[in-house]
Amino acid sequence: MLKKKWSRLIVLSSFFSFFTASAYAAIGCDFSFGTPFATFACGSPFPQTGVYTLTNNTPVAMRINYVQIKQNDAFPASSASITANTCGTSLAAHSSCSVTVTLTTAGPFNRILQIGVNSRQVELDSPVITPTIGCNISSTPSTSFTSLCSLGTTSSFATLAGSTITNTGFTQLNGNLGLSPGTSVTGFPPGVVNGTQFIADTTAATAKNDLTTLFNCLGLQPCTVTIGTVDQAGQTITSTGIGAVNVICSASTININGGALTLSGDPTSVFIFKAGSALNVGSGASIVLAPAIGGVQASNVFWQVGSSAVLGTSSIFKGTIAASQSITMNTGAIMTGRALTQVAAVTFDTNSVVLP
């Protein structure tokens, strides 16, 4: 809509989640963001930079009042900054300038690049994009969790351990098995590995390094919900929005005793649980992903455990466990996810692990 008065202040906003811009280059508007937008590569080291282009579509020079980043998240402001700006205080007719943004660390960013211009036109805003942890996403939220909190080579492992892997009974692992630096794997057979066993070799060592990277990156994500040690059985945790990153924290132990914990959202919603010490899932307990169709995906559920995790008898578990110490799956426990531990052992007893 046009303004009747001249010298109105407009703001052109390019929303970026982890700094992938998504604005419509509005034909006929005084100013527009150019395409393609700046991108930042998944898995690349920091710092990273991206360049945004602004174009004056009018036949006259336009004054630029400010170039700034508006912060809509709890991550440190210093994690993202403008490090170069060729726009100056005025942009000539039918010309372009650039703004360089630098990221210093991974995180669930939700920032807006704003350009304030003296003009007669309306506000040009980009659509809101929901953040994903530490990675680019397009103008349509991604349906998969690919991020700088990357699984790396651990993505193909049903289980990964540091000291030993032991099994009793007919356990099925639908994925690779890895052990490093330990060398003792017992109980396969009768257990079945529908993948490859990597024991104290380069592949296992690389996966262990990637697990450490994943563990540390998950630990950096700021908490959105604090649950303490309250039993989560019978509770429902609902995503805060489409594609939102929900970080649920306990400074000590996360307990799910004998009932169902329901995670509700859409296929792009991410749930990260951070336990300062242990994860205890009681006998018969379950993780339910809702709704059953078009709801939360097990591939987007992560459990960072400061010490050890125990899945009780006949429990049904969803998500990837990244534990510092050990993981024990008691008799009949079923997992859609991964059992990954840095230092100690993973123990199975007639279980099923299916990669998400």
Image (cartoon, helix red, strand yellow):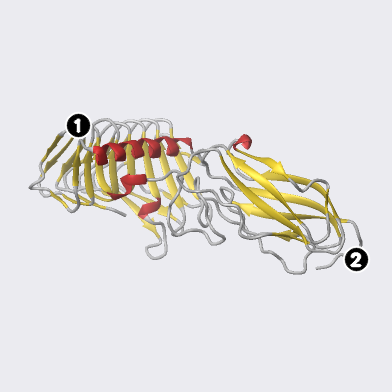
Q: Which mark is residue 4?
A: 2
Residue sitting at the far right: 5
Percent coordinates x, y for residue 131 in the rendering: 54, 51
**On the image, which quarter does residue 248 sit in?**
top left
Kindly report the distance in space between the C-alpha atoms of the residues bearing marks 2 and 1: 75 Å
Mark 2 and mark 1 lie on one chain; the one further toward the N terminus is: 2
Residue type (three-letter) at the residue carrying disc 2: Lys
Percent coordinates x, y for residue 205 in the rendering: 27, 36
Rendered residue at 56%/52% (across/down): 39
Rendered residue at 37%/42% (across/down): 303
Percent coordinates x, y for residue 255 in the rendering: 34, 38
Query: In what element is the residue under mark 1?
Result: loop
Query: In what element is the residue under mark 2?
Result: loop
Q: Is residue 193 left or right of residue 47?
A: left
Q: In front: mark 2 or mark 1? A: 1
Neighbours of disc 2 within 10 Å: few (<14), some (14-19), many (20+):
few
Residue sitting at the far left: 190
| Residue of label 1 | 182
Q: Is residue 23 left or right of residue 284?
A: right
Residue type (three-letter) at the residue carrying disc 1: Gly
Q: Which quadrant, please, contains the C terminus?
A: bottom left
Q: Residues at badges 2 and 1 in contact (C-beta under 8 Å)? A: no
